[in-house]
Amino acid sequence: MNRGMRLDAEAIGSGLTSQRVRDRLVERLRASGIEDERVLRAIGTVPRHLFVDEALAMRAYEDTALPIGHGQTISQPWVVAKMTEALLQTAPRKVLEIGTGSGYQAAVLAALGLEVHTVERIGELLRSARKRFRQIGLEVRSKHDDGYVGWAENAPFDAIMVTAGGAAVVDALLDQLSPGGALIAPVGSATSQELLRLVKHEDGRVERQMLAPVVFVPLLPGTID
């Protein structure tokens, strides 16, 4: 767990944003099949209510996706936990996330002690996420750029997580994945996607595993200030 996390009074929360409510969410996730205790501890530690609009803070520990503006969402906690659990199976150290969004998924990864690099195409979302990382004392390396190109200058990565859905896995991202590493991504149409775990073997062969049906916002090219 990342020892640098700082939780001030706002981050600690109260009432429907309190630690007791976070703990109840963790128990729901455990009951719904999340087994990795490291992931459950991270979910129970990172203050999700800081990563949503203040008007939605009281719903932060419901197991549901919530809007964050610009047509984007903060993912359902079960999906965050499932993706994180799948990513940890190859014991990564250096991770690339495509689609920072609110910053919550990157914060969960950083809380696990991983070296997190995250790319976001919408400048306003990235600026807000950076403020949240600073507020709770998590070190996350971030970049305003097109997710389709990844972060080649910092490659290779032990694992890559894509938090937006596309019709296929982006070849440029697979190219930035270390041999033996895993890429977690939703793949499919706008209304029906499969969460995939792809493991890149030393010989270049890619093994695919289907994890769950999901629906993510679309992976789009370009950048917005």
Image (spheres, rainbow, N blue to C red):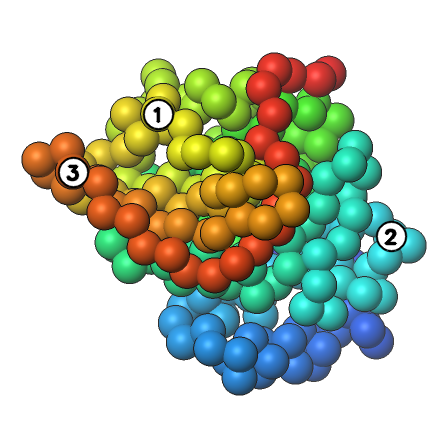
Position of residue 39 relative to residue 145, above or below, is below
Q: Position of residue 110 (x, y in %)?
A: 47, 49
The quadrant in which residue 163 appears is: top right
Residue beneath the point at 39% across and 72% down: 36
Question: Left or right: 82 with respect to 198?
Answer: right
* Number of residues whose C-alpha sits closer than 10 Å to that of mark 3, classed few (under 14), some (14–19) or many (20 or more): few
Q: CA distance from mark 3 to mark 1?
A: 13 Å
The quadrant in which residue 8 appears is: bottom right
Q: Which residue in the structure is indicated by mark 2?
A: 54
Q: CA distance from mark 1 to mark 2?
A: 38 Å
Q: Secondary structure at mark 2?
A: helix
Badge 3 amino acid? Arg
Residue mark closest to the camera, 1 vs 2: 1
Question: Left or right: 196 with respect to 138?
Answer: left
* Number of residues whose C-alpha sits closer than 10 Å to that of mark 1, classed few (under 14), some (14–19) or many (20 or more): few
Residue 103 can be seen, yes or no: no
Q: Which of these two is toward me, 172 or 39?
A: 172
Residue beneath the point at 52% across and 58% down: 213
Task: Tell me the number on the disc at residue 171.
Answer: 1
Q: Secondary structure at mark 1?
A: helix
Residue beneath the point at 25% across and 54% down: 90
Badge 2 amino acid? Glu
Q: Secondary structure at mark 3?
A: loop
Badge 1 amino acid? Asp
Residue mark closest to the camera, 3 vs 2: 3
Mark 3 in CB contact with mark 1 (< 8 angstroms): no
First in residue order: circle 3 vs circle 1? 1
